[in-house]
């Protein structure tokens, strides 16, 4: 938008030679700079959220732009490019106005039409044609300038929607984790509470049975603790097919296109392999949502020397200081412990995780 305003200044600056008096050329140039400055301030309102320039300054700039177009017709140099300052100001008012936008272009066109007729000092057919032509040029140029601001606004809305979808996807994963934790612990805690109450009632009448109930409580508590540790540390067995399907669903909800090869996965993998690779897919999906502005992800599985290799790649990683490593570091140690490897590679526009689990893990 700034470039368009500078282009207006340059175009009219070149055509100022058509103005006969040097003082008049200087005045036109000063007015032109004022109009472009006010237009720039109005354009910044929706884009940067800056305050609207004072109404008086907008009126003065409008009068200056109208004066440039009027003077061009008085001295007989035509309407274009002398209508550009007025078009730029109309587009800026259209962008900066909070309401009644539909009125701006028609009013601007009528204003340009009247200015051209006044400068022509005639209402004959030739003058009317010139007025209609210049009014049309003014409206079209204003619409073209405003279209750039409109596209910026649309892009900003899309980005806000994308951020909201990404946040919703992360929230959904947290809710899924909470539901899984509830499923694991709910039953254990309920049984522990019931058996503890029973043991309390039996303590005086049947100590032996009360002791047996408390031993059951201890066993249940240990099992609940182990299940919780497995869930928190990601050690619970997961289905690779399920994790890939969940990843595709979450990425799609966040506006990220995903490609999976082969589409049906690799059937018949041992549970230990599926567990480790499924955890890698889950961690990489979380990293994409939290640490990138990705638009595309690629997930591929390859059978290799009896083992399986997984590649998870995404574009647009964020700054390396915010990059993911904690979860991947833990998985790297687990995979290395079974003879495999996990490597994360970052470039300016791509983040790739390569994981491989060996044939020995299937045994």
Image (tube, rainbow, N blue to C red):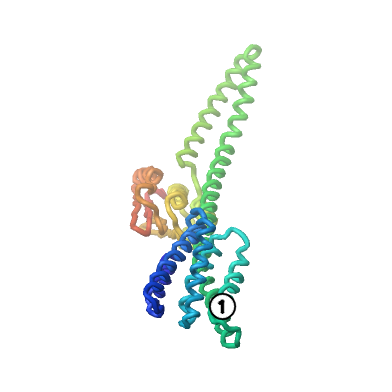
The residue positioned 34% from the left and 58% from the top of the image is 348
The residue positioned 48% from the left and 63% from the top of the image is 39
Question: Horizontal and vertical percent for residue 162?
Answer: 52, 56
- Crowd class of label 1 (few under 14; some 14 to 19; many from 20; radius 10 Å): some
- The furthest residue to the top: 204
Q: Is residue 100 visible?
A: yes
Q: Is residue 248 visible?
A: no
> What number of labels is visible?
1
| Residue identifier under label 1 | 118
Question: Horizontal and vertical percent for residue 73?
Answer: 50, 80
- The furthest residue to the bottom: 125
The residue positioned 50% from the left and 47% from the top of the image is 238
Relative placement, left or right, of 315 versus 53 is left
The residue positioned 50% from the left and 35% from the top of the image is 228
Question: Horizontal and vertical percent for residue 132?
Answer: 58, 81
- The correct choice, above or below, for 337 with respect to 259 in the image is above
Placement of the N terminus among the 4 image quadrants: bottom left
Relative placement, left or right, of 47 versus 334 is right
Name the residue nearer the viewer: 306 or 91.
91
């Amino acid at each position: 938008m700034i470039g368009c305003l500078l282009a207006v200044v340059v175009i009219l600056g070149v055509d100022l030679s058509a103005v006969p008096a040097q003082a008049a050329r200087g005045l036109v140039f000063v007015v032109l700079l004022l109009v472009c400055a006010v237009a720039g301030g109005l354009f910044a309102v929706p884009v940067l959220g800056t305050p609207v320039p004072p109404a008086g300054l907008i009126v003065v700039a409008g009068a200056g732009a109208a004066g440039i177009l009027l003077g061009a017709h008085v001295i007989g140099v035509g309407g274009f490019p002398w209508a550009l300052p007025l078009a730029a100001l109309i587009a800026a008012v259209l962008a900066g106005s909070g309401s009644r936008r539909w009125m701006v272009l028609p009013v601007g066109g009528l204003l340009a039409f009247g200015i051209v007729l006044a400068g022509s000092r005639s209402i004959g057919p030739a003058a009317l044609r010139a007025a209609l032509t210049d009014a049309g040029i003014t409206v079209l140029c204003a619409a073209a300038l405003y279209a750039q601001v409109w596209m910026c606004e649309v892009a900003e809305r899309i980005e806000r929607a994308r951020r909201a979808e990404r946040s919703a996807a992360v929230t959904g994963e947290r809710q899924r984790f909470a539901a899984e934790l509830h499923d694991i612990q709910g039953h254990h805690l309920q049984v522990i509470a019931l058996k503890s109450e029973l043991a309390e009632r039996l303590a005086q009448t049947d100590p032996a049975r009360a002791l047996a109930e408390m031993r059951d409580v201890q066993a249940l508590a240990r099992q609940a603790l182990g299940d919780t540790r497995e869930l928190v540390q990601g050690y619970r067995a997961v289905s690779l097919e399920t994790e890939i399907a969940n990843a595709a669903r979450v990425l799609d909800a966040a506006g990220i296109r995903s490609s999976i090869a082969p589409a049906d996965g690799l059937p018949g993998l041992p549970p230990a392999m599926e567990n480790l690779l499924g955890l890698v897919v889950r961690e990489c999906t979380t990293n994409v949502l939290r640490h990138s502005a990705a638009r595309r992800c690629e997930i591929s599985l390859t059978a290799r020397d009896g083992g399986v290799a997984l590649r998870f790649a995404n574009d647009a990683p964020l700054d390396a200081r915010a990059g993911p490593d904690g979860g991947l570091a833990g998985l790297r140690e687990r995979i290395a412990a079974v003879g495999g490897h996990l490597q994360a590679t970052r470039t300016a526009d791509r983040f790739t995780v390569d994981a491989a689990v060996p044939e020995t893990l299937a045994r």
